Amino acid sequence: MWSFMKILLIYPNKTMTTRIPLGIGYLVAYLKHAGHEVGIFDTTFMDCGSGVSDDNLRAASLQVRNPDFAQYNIVAKKIDILNELDKKISVFKPDMVAVSVVDPNYRFGLILAEKIKEKNKNIFVIFGGPTVTFSPEEVIIEGVVDAICVGEGEQALPELCAAIEEGRKIKNIKNIWCKEKGDIYRNDVRPLIDLDTLLPPDWNMFDERHLIRPLGGKMYRMGVFAITRGCLFRCTYCANFALSGIYKGKGSLYRIQDPEKMVNQIAEFKRRYNLNFIFFVDDIFPLHRPHVLDKFCSLYKEKVRLPFNVSLHAELVKEAQFAKLVDAGCRNVCIGLESGSPSIREEMFERKCSNAQIIEAFRLAHKYKIRSSTFNIIGIPGESRKDIFQTIDLNRKANPTTATLTFLHPYRGTKVRDICLKEKIFDIGKEKAHEDGYRTDSCLNLKNVSAKELNGIFKTFQMYLKMPKICYFFIHLAEGESIFSKIIFSFLKKIFYCITYKEAVRDFSDDPAFCSNNNDKSAKGTPKEGCEVVIASNNS
């Protein structure tokens, strides 16, 4: 009987997104709390052969201006990943390997698991994460997978480890599906976890470069947190729709942690990791809960005093609460616009907020002089070029600082995936081949817009948004891929940078509300395309 287990957690990050994954951080904390030895195999800073990183892709499509990542050693190291994994297994000698996967890295996760099983058939391999939760039958049948965790794993994974330690059967553990003698045992999920009982996530095992993130053209030591889980809405492109079914009768999907507990955690992590910006990744920050907001703002202003980012739903934005958020330190808001076509937004995405509500939310961002960003999607079933230009027009009216743009991808667990399959515009058989390209083009065979036209609009979207309409003729010419189009695009790009420089680059560390926290700047880099590079240090 083992006194403890050695568990290797694998984070198969192919896009070099520097952000400590919250879920894995919580699992590390719970496994350590149960007495286990935990290791991490993180591919974030390894060259995974998937092309351009997310941050560089956004810069190439003019969505952001990034500092020079190489200056902070945020580069993909050319290395034999499978050989590195083999060495990690040989040195760490894990009893269990847990792989966390989302749709874009699922196949990559399987490749890593296959490498492990090739020489170490007795290592217990378990998969978890969104892909597993929404397609458990697809994952559990994989030969390299011994078990899967459906839904939240903070309680389920330590329980599984305890059962294995003690030689007990594992086929009745809630949230866990496992295989035994050719049979698959499928267990229901346990009730949703009470966020006030959560242990703080453990960040100590992650590369420190995960804390260095760009925003507004500069670099910060950025901490990622969530005061909530779940969402109030059921948009068709989001997996919360499926989660609500999986956890039906198991508690409220949308949960809010006690603000005092969260603020105390942030204050401690600020001190421990020298943070100077806080990034909340909640689907919806609880602006709509006045008592929660009041308590959070009061405590945050007293104990943390750092600039922060939140995501909001335009339908829930009210000026009184918005003003309190800004007073507490909010300096960046992200709001889903998704589509400027009311019919697509309401009928395809089931988002009921009006154009007026979206415009009003951004009016408040301008009034209170904070940075703002829209989320936008193109390549939607039934969408036409005219619909896409409605999205551009609504952005022009809202006038966000920046606009994030993505192609619609029908992820597992989303209602829009079922729509795409029903309309026969999405081929599941080609999903594996498209894993590396989901960020760079559409995987759908759309009827009203060709792939070539869609890619051209994606490339020039920001120009249409920020440049005068008198330029539209030339921007349209720049959509193409001919040498002439590329020359026009290069010329317009220079004009675009001149027009947007002042709003694209913003130094939150110079804000008078926080300057006592950020008295000097620990790193300055060479300006790149007009962008100063700053990491402010926190000396409070």
Image (cartoon, rainbow, N blue to C red):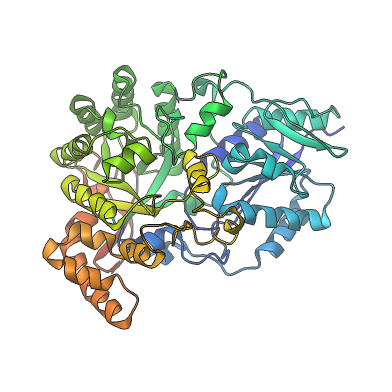
Q: Is residue 455 left or right of residue 9?
A: left
Q: Which of 161/247 is in front?
A: 247
Q: Specify whether residue 189 is in view.
A: yes
Q: How many marks?
A: 0
Residue at 50% x, 51% y is 208
Q: Specify whether residue 336 is in view.
A: no
Residue at 19% x, 41% y is 512
Q: Quadrant of residue 170?
A: top right
Q: Quadrant of residue 293?
A: top left
Residue at 38% x, 41% y is 348
Q: Is residue 125 left or right of residue 453?
A: right
Residue 168 location in percent, x, y? 84, 27
Q: Which of 435/380 is in front?
A: 380
Residue that protrudes farthest toward the bottom in the picture: 483
Q: Quadrant of residue 34?
A: top right
Residue 481 location in percent, x, y? 35, 76
Residue 274 location in percent, x, y? 41, 44
Which quarter of the rendered picture does the N terminus lie within? Answer: top right
Q: Which of 338/165 is in front?
A: 338
Q: Is residue 434 above or below residue 223?
A: below
Q: Is residue 420 left or right of residue 479?
A: right
